[in-house]
Image: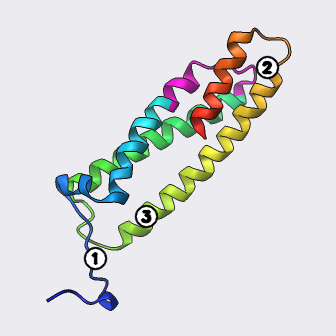
Amino acid sequence: MAPSAASGGSSLPSGFAVFTTFPDLLFLFEFVFGGLVWILIASSHVPIPLIQGWVMFTSVFCFIATTLLLFLCVIGAHGSRTSWITLDATYHCMASLFYFGASVLEALAAIQLQVGFTYKYYHENIAAVLGIV
């Protein structure tokens, strides 16, 4: 007999079943692209250290948090409690806001680099902005 929708019949996957559901499969893309953004941001040249610091904090924090959440889901630490769905949604909303703020700051730095810096540095920062978004 199928569980009723009113009782919250969905259960959270654990182990390698995490990689078979669509929302959890997005962890892999977030993990890979988060690492690429981290590398791209680290190689960009931003003249304002505060902007570079926030962008690096955002990329490193989100990369580590995604890795931790993926690991906890794989080992089944959630125990099929639905509060983990709220935790996951809250984390992803926060990460989206962080990445949006970082992309705005990186775009501002790229605009400021347009005059006075070499063409190569300007294009590296444009690539970094597009990598974040």
**Looking at the image, which residue is at 48% across and 43% down?**
62
Q: Is residue 45 visible?
A: no
For disc 1, the marked residue is 10
6 over 121 or under it: above or below: below
Kind of residue indicated by mark 1: Ser
43 over 104 or under it: above or below: above
Q: CA distance from mark 1 to mark 2?
A: 50 Å
Give the class, few, some or many, for how many residues have Cα within 10 Å of label 3's Cα (few <14, many ≥20). Answer: few
Q: Secondary structure at mark 2?
A: helix
7 left or right, relative to 113: left
Q: Position of residue 123 (x, y in %)?
A: 68, 18
Q: Position of residue 95 (x, y in %)?
A: 54, 50
Viewer-nearest of labels 1 and 3? Answer: 1
**Looking at the image, which residue is at 27% across and 82% down?**
9
71 left or right, relative to 129: left
Mark sitting earlier along the chain (1/2): 1
**Looking at the image, which residue is at 37% across and 59% down?**
23
Give the class, few, some or many, for how many residues have Cα within 10 Å of label 1's Cα (few <14, many ≥20). Answer: few
**Looking at the image, which residue is at 44% across and 32% down?**
35
Q: CA distance from mark 3 to mark 2?
A: 38 Å
Q: Nearer the viewer, residue 111 or 81?
A: 111
Q: Quadrant of residue 133?
A: top right
26 left or right, relative to 39: left
Range drawn in magenta? 37-49
Give the class, few, some or many, for how many residues have Cα within 10 Å of label 2's Cα (few <14, many ≥20). Answer: many
43 over 2 or under it: above or below: above
For disc 2, the marked residue is 113
Q: In the picture, which quadrant includes the N terminus?
A: bottom left
Residue 87, label in figure: 3
